[in-house]
Amino acid sequence: MLGVYSNQLIRGISRTIPRAFAACFASAPGAPETISEKWPPYNVCSLPFNIKPNPNHIKLKEPHKRANSLIRQLSIEAAESARKNMDFDSFKPGDAIEVTMKKRNGSKTEEVFRGICVAKHNDYYNSTFTIRCNIAGEAVTILYSTYQPDIKSVKLIQESYLNKAKKRTHKAKLYYLKDKPILDIRIASNYVPERKYIDKKKNNEWLISRGKKPED
């Protein structure tokens, strides 16, 4: 009988003593709960468990990394500054555009090139776009720097020219147009599309501005 009571007493003590110790070390009532830091942090997951990150670590310590960061920042600022004086319409590969060049080399007239944008590369001030156009009966591919000062304006003639603005051009590079007949890329100077934008609402606004009936 005594053995049974002693076993029950031992069980009760073993249950209550850990709780009493935990209550002593617990935070006071009403105190804000502290969130334990997760270990290991995301930036040291590849380090051994006993190595902590250096809080005094300097980012871009290597000279070539600092130089690349500085060049990138200068490129961003130059692109933002040049964009303020630009007369460019938004366009994508597959759109028909008109590029007007400023007068140069004593020329009295401006050069105008109409063609299809076959590629577009976005890299801040180093951005470029390529058009495929017809010059004097010959198919020519011209690469332009987006922010070059010789360009006066870039106007959108028609979105998705090959599909007549009925559906989008899903390819980002249209170099296959080099193998197409010249009549497929020829855009006359008096060409006016029946449909300019793929978006129906935007296209109806364009039709109304030209005094035409919008699409149903």
Image (cartoon, rainbow, N blue to C red):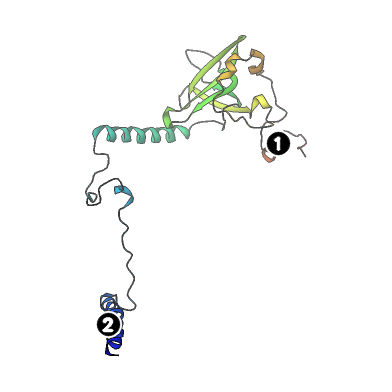
- Vertical arrangement, residue 65 with respect to residue 182, above or below: below
Residue type, numbered disc 1: Ser
Residue 167 visible in the displayed image: yes
Question: Viewed as shown, does residue 83 lie left or right of 208?
Answer: left
Q: Which residue is mark 2?
A: 10
Q: Is residue 37 above or below residue 131?
A: below
Instruction: Tell me the kind of residue under disc 2.
Output: Ile
Frontmost residue, 54 versus 90? 54
Location of the C terminus (image quadrant): top right
Q: Who's the residue at 38% across and 32% down the image? A: 75
Outermost residue on the front side: it is: 1
Up/down of 134 relative to 20, above or below: above
Q: What x and y, as percent, mark residue 13?
A: 27, 82
Give the residue number, with chain letter if any, for mark 1: 209
Residue at figure coordinates x 27%, y 42% from the top left: 59
Mark 1 vs 2: CB contact within 8 A? no
Where residue 96 sits in the image (x, y, percent)?
62, 25
Q: In the image, what residue occupies the spot 72% across and 35% down?
A: 207
Crowding at mark 1 (Cα within 10 Å: few <14, some 14-19, many 20+): few
Q: Quadrant of residue 11?
A: bottom left
Q: Residue 103 or 95: which is nearer the viewer?
A: 95
The N terminus sits in image quarter: bottom left
Of helix, strand and loop, which one carries label 2? Answer: helix
Lower sequence index among marks 1 and 2:
2
Helix, strand or loop at label 1? It is helix
The single residue placed furthest to the bottom in the displayed view is: 1
| Image coords of residue 121 (percent x, y) | 48, 28
Label 1 and label 2: CA atoms lie apart by: 93 Å
On the image, the x and y values in percent for residue 32 come to 33, 72
